[in-house]
Amino acid sequence: MQFGEEEDRLRLKKITHERLIDLLLFQVRNLWRVDGLYFLGIEEKFGTEVATEIDANCWRSLARIEAKELKRIFNLDKVESIETLLELLSNTSWALYQTKKEIEISGNRGIFRVVSCKIQEARLKKALEVFPCKKVRFGYLKSFAEEIGNFDVICKACPPEEKPEKCWCEWEFRKK
């Protein structure tokens, strides 16, 4: 039996709404499992610096792809508001993977804060050092914000900087 996207769509339409959400979040977790496994393999063989460089390049590319796809899915040509930018960011694989996050919007700026980072907490559980993820995440968020529209991103906190008391990382977005 051969089938494609059309048949997949018909099959998925038969799944209950709740199960479909579970399936979506399962797939997001799988994406991050693959990311973590390949990163650990590269890190083990070549060191954290090389693994981080490869990771940063991958996530910058993914950010552009996610931004374009989210604009298509939500039928948006041009994004002008911080609210819309943060709504789209909330639907990325990175944001969906982070189960404890906060968003604040004030005028022409918005904050996206990861309160409990599953990636960092998994590393600590495995007795690994905190991952200095600023280079990876900044590149990802900068590429995403630029692809979405005319926005800047500023890192307020992110490892390897000292962890703030209330979160793992905090990012500010502003309209250019």
Image: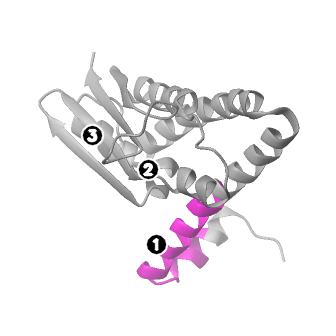
Give the left or right position of residue 43, taking residue 15 as reference: right
Q: What residue sits 82% from the left and 71% below the top?
A: 2
Measure the alpha-carbon separation of dots 2 and 3. Answer: 15 Å
Find the magenta span and give its range.
9-31
Question: Where residue 170 sits: x, y (%)?
Answer: 35, 37
| Label 2 packing within 10 angstroms: few (<14), some (14-19), many (20+) | some
| Label whose residue precedes the other's in the sequence (1 or 2) | 1
Numbered label attached to residue 95: 2
Q: What residue sits 34% from the left and 38% below the top?
A: 76
Identity, as a three-letter code, of the amino acid under mark 1 = Ile
Measure the alpha-carbon separation of dots 1 and 3. Answer: 22 Å
Which mark's residue is nearer the viewer, 1 or 2? 2
Element carrying mark 3: helix
Give the left or right position of residue 87, taking residue 162 as reference: left
State yes or no: discs 2 and 3 in contact (Cβ < 8 Å). Answer: no
Numbered label attached to residue 21: 1
Mark 3 sits on what residue? 84
| Label 1 packing within 10 angstroms: few (<14), some (14-19), many (20+) | few
Identity, as a three-letter code, of the amino acid under mark 3 = Thr
Q: Residue furthest left?
A: 107
